[in-house]
Image: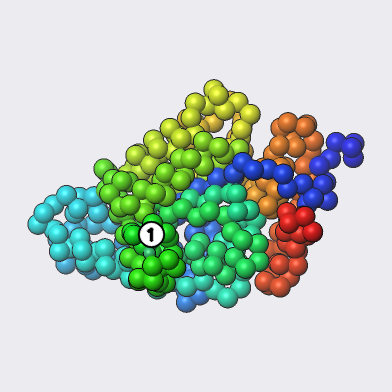
Amino acid sequence: MSSHLFTVQDEIKTAKFGRPHVVILGAGASLAAFPNGDRNGHRLPLIKNFVEVVGLTALLAQNNVNPPYDNFEGIYSDIAIDPDKAALRSDIEQRVYDYFAALELPDTPTLYDHLILSLRPKDVIATFNWDPFLWQAAARNYHFGKVPCLLFLHGNIAIGYCPDCKVMLGRHQHCSRCGQPVAASPLLYPVKQKNYQSDPAIAGHWRTLVRALEKAWTITFFGYGAPSTDVEAVKLLKNAWGDVEKRNLEEIEIIDIRTEEDLLATWEPFIHTHHYKIGTSFYDSYIGRHPRRSCEALWARLMECLFPEGTNIPANADFDELYDWFQPRIDAENGT
Ligand SMILES: [Zn+2]
């Protein structure tokens, strides 16, 4: 039997894939990463508790927007198309921006650090989230193993953009090429007709994602609920992934706490027959079980009929222990 095993040692020394693993993050991923909120206990909202968590209840009530407040997308969409509510709209946007801008990573490694460390620079993480955690986690781990390509599909609080040089940087940095202060990335708010072309930075992120999906060997959807105001986004993703009939070897993975029935209703257009895997925890996913080797492990299983043994990221380790654990994988990638 052992000859049919793709062992952890095999996995560590096999870093041959050039095709990307594309990961799409939604609000459920940030909630899973920060179940108790940020370092100061500020909570991460989902759509159904967004108004309450971000603190918009009183503002809405004062402006004659009646409860229930459990659908921020619907509420915001209605306000955005009403010219009499322009002042309220800008008040809401400012408060939302300020709420997310104040969020800070805890000092200890988080699920987002584990996610960043478990992918290689050839891979792509595209997030719909506005919170700064993915960017902050990438910034603090970059020195160790580089980081995957990060894309912010609805804008992000942590990033800025130099329109002249067309580069993405941290929000408070100066452009590394021309030296001018960067422009903040606008947040794309939940209206039904989103225009992904109106902001050049966001349009660029979408173009990069489309190219990555065309080459991708596998996709993971993590905590992304594909809300109704994202029809355009889902259409773009689907077009880029292409015809499932021609994708007969690739497999997609869904990490989500919703029921399988509910998830398949959303993701069926992406799935070729039985080539999908559903789980509730990142740590049991392909990436979590085969850090920096998810595509290689999937290849071994699907193409070489091997059984990938898999491993567990030391989820409670501090940064020194975590880097020691990852070091053999980085060494193999560098040929050292
Ligand atoms: Zn510049």
Residue 150: tell me if it is visible.
yes
Quadrant holding the N terminus = top right
Asked which quadrant contains residue 192, the reply is top left
Q: Quadrant of the C terminus?
A: bottom right
Residue at 30 percent across and 52 percent down: it is 199
Q: Residue furthest top?
A: 245
Question: In what quadrant does ligand 1 lie?
Answer: bottom left
Identify which residue is drawn at 66% across, 66% down. Answer: 144
The residue lying toward the viewer, choosing from 64 and 107, is 107
Towards the viewer: 224 or 14: 14
Which residue of the protein is positioned furthest toward the front in this rendering? 178
Looking at the image, which residue is at 56% across and 61% down?
Answer: 112
Count up the numbered dots. Answer: 1
Q: Position of residue 139 (x, y in %)?
A: 54, 67
Q: State left or right for residue 202 relative to residue 122.
A: left
Q: Position of residue 229 (x, y in %)?
A: 32, 44
132, above or below 106, in the image: above
Q: Is residue 215 left or right of residue 98?
A: right
Q: Is mark 1 within 8 Å of ligand 1?
A: yes
Residue 20 percent location from the top left of the image: 59, 44
The crowd level at tag 1 (other Cα within 10 Å; few <14, some 14-19, many 20+) is: few
- On screen, residue 81 versus residue 310, left or right, reads left
Q: Amino acid at mark 1?
A: Cys
**Disc 1 designates what residue?**
165
- For numbered disc 1, what is the local secondary structure? loop
Residue depicted at 46% across the width and 46% down the height: 208
Confirm whether residue 262 shows in the render. no
